[in-house]
């Protein structure tokens, strides 16, 4: 997927919002909490970064094409510098899971407010 296609997909996830922060980084959030970042190719945060399920972080961050996300690895985020290294199905699955992990961590009241 291209970064534009990723942005379109993230925007369509339930209750997702997008803001631009940190020198042009597209930040996708659910309930005010980040789940995906899309940066310019040479940005320090990595091209595509997203929250991983905590139980999958260690294996995922060492998998080919992935690396710990700069600044966010302590929160179990990974980066993919070349989004074309994943199939569309794989990328969508990772993004959907990132969204779900963040949505599940929201306070119950916020989840109800957002329709989860």
Image (tube, grey):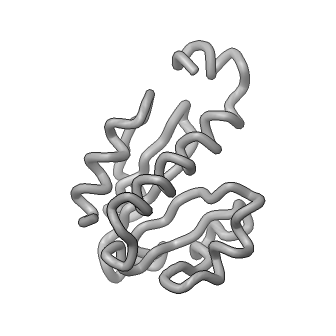
Q: Indicate left or right for 5 with 72 as reference.
A: left
Count the labels in the image. Answer: 0
Q: Position of residue 116 (x, y in %)?
A: 58, 21
Q: Indicate left or right for 7 with 70 as reference.
A: left
As drawn, 16 above or below 95: above
Q: Position of residue 85 (x, y in %)?
A: 37, 79
Q: Indicate left or right for 5 with 80 as reference.
A: left
Measuring 43% from the left and 29% from the top, which residue is drawn there?
14
Q: To which quarter of the image does residue 102 belong? A: top right
The image quadrant where one finds the N terminus is bottom left
- Residue situated furthest right in the rendering: 55
Q: Nearer the viewer, residue 28 or 94?
A: 94
Q: To which quarter of the image does residue 52 belong? A: bottom right
As drawn, 6 above or below 101: below
Measuring 38% from the left and 58% from the top, which residue is drawn there?
89
Q: Position of residue 103 (x, y in %)?
A: 61, 35
Q: Position of residue 26 (x, y in %)?
A: 35, 55
Measuring 33% from the left and 40% from the top, which residue is drawn there?
11
As drawn, 110 above or below 72: above
Q: To which quarter of the image does residue 48 belong? A: bottom left
Measuring 62% from the left and 21% from the top, which residue is drawn there?
111
């Amino acid at each position: 997927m291209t970064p534009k296609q990723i942005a379109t997909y993230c925007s369509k996830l339930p209750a997702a919002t997008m803001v631009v922060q940190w020198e042009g980084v597209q930040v996708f959030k659910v309930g005010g909490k980040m789940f995906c970042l899309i940066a310019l190719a040479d940005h320090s945060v990595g091209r595509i970064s997203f929250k991983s399920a905590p139980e999958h972080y260690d294996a995922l961050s060492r998998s080919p094409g992935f690396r710990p996300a700069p600044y966010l690895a302590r929160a179990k985020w990974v980066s993919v510098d070349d989004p074309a290294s994943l199939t569309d199905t794989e990328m969508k699955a990772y993004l959907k899971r990132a969204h779900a992990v963040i949505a599940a961590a929201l306070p119950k009241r916020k989840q109800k407010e957002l329709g989860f």
